Image (cartoon, rainbow, N blue to C red):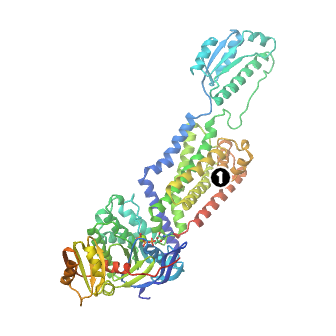
Amino acid sequence: MSELSIEAVHLSRRFGSFLAVDDVSFSAARGEIFGYLGANGAGKSTTIRMLCGLLAPTAGEARVAGFDVKTAPESVKASIGYMSQKFSLYLDLPVRDNLDFFGGAYGLSGPDFAARADEVLRLCDLEHERDAITGSLPGGIRQRLALGCAILHRPAVLFLDEPTAGVDPVSRRHFWRLIRRLAREGTTIFVTTHYLDEAEYCGRIGLMVDGRLVALDTPAALKRRYVPGRVLSVRGRNLASAAASLRSRPGIIAVEPFGAGLHLQVAAENWNADSVAQALASAGAQAVEVESGEPTLEDVFLAVVARPREVRHD
Amino acid sequence: MTRPMRFLVRVGAMASKEVMHIRRDPRTLYMALAMPVVMLLIFGFGVSFDMDRIPLVVLDGDRSVASRALVRAVSAGHEFVIAADSDEATALRMIRRGQALAALAIPADYQRDLAAGRDGEVQLIVDGADGVVANQILAKIDGLVRAESLRRIDLAAEPPLQVKVFTLFNPEARSALFMVPGLAVYLLAIAAVLLTALTVSGEWERGSMEQLFASPVGRLEIVLGKLLPYLGLGMLQLLLVVAVGAVIFDVPIRGSVALLFFVGFLFLAGMLGQGLFISVVARSQLVATQAGALSSLLPSLLLSGMLVPIENMPRILQALSSVIPARYFVHAMRGIMLKGSGLSILWTDLVALTIFALAILALATTRFRRKLA
Ligand SMILES: Nc1ncnc2c1ncn2[C@@H]1O[C@H](COP(=O)(O)OP(=O)(O)OP(=O)(O)O)[C@@H](O)[C@H]1O
Ligand SMILES: [Mg+2]
């Protein structure tokens, strides 16, 4: 068996005249956590649906768990777990009934399945909620149940479409502990998210902009590539006009508004925190405070999105 | 595990989930079981088309042996009760107040006319506010008076001449007999179409259909798992309607009970398929409810022959009714229950119901793509 769990080759999907996914190619190895990042409407869910055999690609090919999504969608479906973006368990049923149903949907039954369901309840920390009506549970617990339903049949590949959207930070951390554990045990995980802090957990990250995969690498490599040099975060008053004068100076790579302040990306050989503070103050800014920090994926994201792209005409 | 085994497990999982939903939502059970019985009782008792114990005022201007005999004849059955024996002014007042629905005026020379061999002429004043009621009263009085005058004329003759009206199969013209089979159709149609339309469109709305499509559950498994519980519920409903009809309204089942339920099964399968088709196309519960209600209610009420005999419909509606399964079900139900008809007469109905069920189920299953776009 190939060690590649997911292989997408020139995958595209068109809705009418609108190209939702545009010539996307990537692969993910067994046990990898592959993060898929992008703004709303970037084409993340559409990519997942094609990989799950739910949506036919308009062009290109994909293999998941060794099966072609076009020619063997049924084999793909039997080997994957899927958590759709919209929470879609049965809220009127108890936790255990939801597990029982999805087990049955994957053709599982009998004492082996009962033992597996108990194991999943334990794994997802749902033992106390087993008889609770799903609709009465908070979002974080529901998401863990949805994950539980998706892993009952021990899928080789798990697709999670924004699994932690709208969930509190503690539950998110809990959820990610589970994800990392599954990956360690050999499950390949393809996960989309809006939370850039979560993306740090991923082995590799693909960045989607308007249907195109514009960057793909490990978080560290992405930072090196897109946020070279030093990252400085600046606070103060009258920053906007001062920053404009700074932009043209040599060694200033990028100036991005960030909250009430600025994020500066500077060449390490030309600039440091003190010299930036001085330059801003002399350009008219007041109460300037500069801190140097590690580049975050947020900086990467902003750098990638800000890069000029060729204009497409459809 | 073998393939057929997994197929059964999946259908079983779908079906038992559906049963769990039904158990947790009493509205479904109410709609399927209580509503038909309630409606049957309302129709059976309240909207009865039979007139019984109609209050009648008698204005006897003759006060003879013959006129008293006529009054006795009119009030002997259970159709009329004498509300008063009085004058014209009182009669009109009572009718206006709704204390009486009709007045029978016997002229002063009634006995003499009869003795002379002429038809005794009597006058009937009827509250015409409700045309159906008025017509029934007219017909009933007319029959009674005619019979009575004939009896008198031929009192001496052997044997006495009598006019007899036979109503075939429903000698007392009881509407319950006619209505129970008709209502069964109407109630089964609505419940079956609506329930399936709701449950499948609910999966679309909830987003769980996408989750199901991402699993190896096949569309036939989804369809069977969705339909089987409602088929069971529908058969229970049929049993209930027939039982209420038999126990409370004395509606007989003169033919085969097995055939009755087999016809019911075929009809239900078609109605469930119709609900499935609607929800596959509509995908939203709101649209599915409206389309489901309209497409089951109107045809089964208006085109099935339940209320309006098919022979009395305009040509175009007659043609339309021939593609409505309710028409064949009404015909078969009435045949089995009231006439004791068997397969040799009803086979065309069975064939029509089978064709509809197979066609709509096949159409719904093929339209039901396991793809999102
Ligand atoms: N079935 C469809 N028909 C037409 N357009 C669609 C369809 N599905 C998605 N789109 C469009 O394709 C684009 C990409 O959608 P997609 O759901 O993949 O985005 P996404 O990256 O998942 O966004 P989000 O973060 O909001 O979930 C959007 O503009 C969307 O409107
Ligand atoms: Mg999405």
Q: Is residue A314 above or below residue B184?
A: below
Q: Secondary structure at mark 1?
A: helix
Q: Nearer the viewer, residue B37 or B247?
A: B37
Q: Is residue A298 left or right of residue B15?
A: left
Q: Nearer the viewer, residue B362 or A250?
A: A250
Instruction: Tell me which residue sits at (28%, 68%) in the image.
Output: A171
Q: Quadrant of residue A247?
A: bottom left
Q: Position of residue A109 (x, y in %)?
A: 43, 69
Question: How many C-alpha atoms fall within 10 Å of the one at disc 1: few (<14), some, or many (≥20)?
Answer: many
Residue at the outermost bottom position: A269
Q: Quadrant of residue B353?
A: bottom right
Total marks in image: 1
Q: Position of residue B331 (x, y in %)?
A: 67, 47
Instruction: Tell me which residue sits at (50%, 65%) in the image.
Output: B11
Q: Is residue B6 left or right of residue B107?
A: left
Instruction: Tell me which residue sits at (63%, 61%) in the image.
Output: B358
Asked if residue B123 can be seen in this view, the reply is yes
Q: Is residue B363 above or below residue A198?
A: above
Q: Position of residue B164 (x, y in %)?
A: 75, 28
Q: Identify the chain of the residue marked 1, using the numbered disc in the image.
A: B
Q: Position of residue A82 (x, y in %)?
A: 42, 73
Disc 1 designates what residue?
B325
Q: Nearer the viewer, residue B362 or A232?
A: A232
Q: Quadrant of residue B133?
A: top right
- Mark 1, ligand 1, within 8 Å: the answer is no
Q: Nearer the viewer, residue B31 or B12?
A: B31
Q: Is residue B291 above or below residue A222?
A: above
Q: Amino acid at mark 1?
A: Pro
Asked if residue B192 can be seen in this view, the reply is no
